Amino acid sequence: MTPHGVVAPFCSGCEILIASPMKEPESEDPRAVIGLLDPSARAHITPSLLSFSAPWPRFLTMLENMGASFLITYVWEDIRRRFGH
């Protein structure tokens, strides 16, 4: 598995939400996709939001590794409180 498990390609809002995530499962090492960085798309979404799409195989790997990730640390709890959760 590559250490580059997430990609943030610069492309249109439509491509990043549909085409890019749909083609990742066909690759040898599917990556998650962060998107909505396109200035024309940003004008139509809440400024603090981005999109995140993960192909099913990548999502399952993320679930397997969750117990050893930042999600179980006190740092994450502090961040969650900052966002009101």
Image (tube, helix red, strand yellow):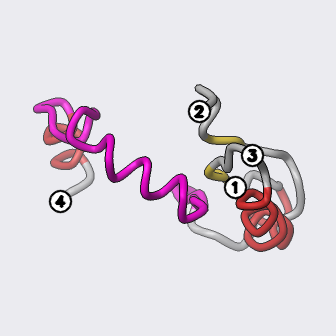
Which amino acid type is marked by label 2?
Met
Please give the label number shown on residue 85.
4
Residue 45 falls left or right of residue 38 = left
| Of callouts 4 and 2, the N-terminal one | 2
- What residue is at 47 percent from the left and 57 percent from the top? 59
Which residue is identified by label 1?
35
Report if residue 50 lies within the magenta region.
Answer: yes
Question: Which corner quadrant of the image does residue 1 belong to?
Answer: top right
Please give the label number shown on residue 1.
2
The residue sitting at the top extreme is: 3
Residue span colored magenta: 47-75
Q: Give the spatial CA distance, label 2 vs label 1.
A: 22 Å
Depth order, front residue of 14/6: 6
Please give the label number shown on residue 66.
none
Q: Give the spatial CA distance, label 4 vs label 2.
A: 33 Å
Q: Residues within 10 Å of mark 2 (few under 14, many from 20)?
A: few
